[in-house]
Image (cartoon, rainbow, N blue to C red):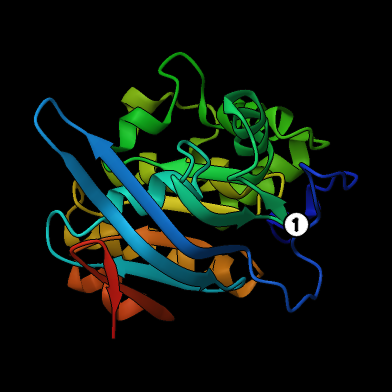
Amino acid sequence: MTGPGAFRFDADPFTADVFRETPAPAAVCTDVVKTYRTATETVTALAGVSLEVPRAQVTVVVGPSGSGKSSLLRLLACIDSPDSGAVTVGGARVDTLGARGRRRLRQRQVAYLFQRPGENLLPYLDAAAQVRLAAQLRGAPVDDDGVHDLLARLGLGDRADHRPAQLSGGEQQRLAVACGVVGGPALVVADEPTAELDTAAAERVLAAMTELAADGVAFLVSSHDPRVMAAADGFVHLDRGQRVP
């Protein structure tokens, strides 16, 4: 195995080998509107946002607090559904699915990386078991050699039998990246993945992401970190729920 695409599974509406050559984007939003109701008002988080998330790139979502970044990530991670407009991930329409359908699509086609590294991992499993479980949940064939090759590629070859508490924050986040890409999801969504890391650890996480993007992985990252912006292939700028140049 030389990369995450070695974990393959048969295509159906919820699974696909996304590492083949294809011009289709990993995800698409078209005229998406998302509102939230509070006790006193209705807040528009996204107001007619359209975008494409290309494969084989790191795309960074930027904008001030309250611009709609988190809402956009939640839609593309298949956690929420829009009020109107279309959302497509891995060729499947998210906006036409109920909660159960979104959950199944999310399991197979999306990985979500939280800001705090430890929140991405199960404390009682070692690194190799974390990756095996992520592959199994995506319905992907898994073997020990492939797991260890992927860990080695991310600089974790000597940490395969370590649990999260035995890893540094940067190692935990690289392990989360390994779990995110194994099995070939259409999209890896990351919310401020370097915010809790020092410079050296952040640079290693970003190096892993850019290397895996070169293999075909689509990363969508929300961040204020200039280190992340320097590693980006493209940007989505949001302000007050709208996409801006």
Which image quadrant is residue 66 in? bottom left
Q: Amino acid at mark 1?
A: Gly
x and y percentages locating residue 191 in the rendered image? 32, 49
Determine whether, in the image, residue 152 is placed left or right of residue 76.
Answer: right
Q: Quadrant of residue 244?
A: bottom left
Which residue lies under the disc numbered 1? 5
Secondary structure under tag 1 reads helix
Q: Is residue 178 above or below residue 245?
A: above
Tell me which residue sits at (38%, 27%) in the image. Answer: 164
Residue 72, horizontal then vertical, whole percent: 37, 53
Residue sitting at x 69%, y 28%: 137
Front residue (pair 80, 223): 80
| Apparent side of residue 92 relative to residue 231 in the rendered image (left or right) | right
Residue at the bottom extreme of this rendering? 245
Percent of width and height locating residue 160: 55, 34
Q: Is residue 171 above or below residue 208?
A: above
Residue situated in front as seen by the camera: 121 or 102 = 102
What quarter of the picture does the C terminus occupy? bottom left
Q: Please indicate whether residue 17 sits to the left or right of residue 138 in the image.
A: right
Q: Quadrant of the N terminus?
A: bottom right
Nearer to me, 41 or 224: 41
Judge the density around disc 1: few (<14), some (14-19), many (≥20) Cα neighbours within 10 Å.
many
Q: Residue at x 64, y 36 (%)?
A: 97
Residue 90 image-quadrant placement: bottom right
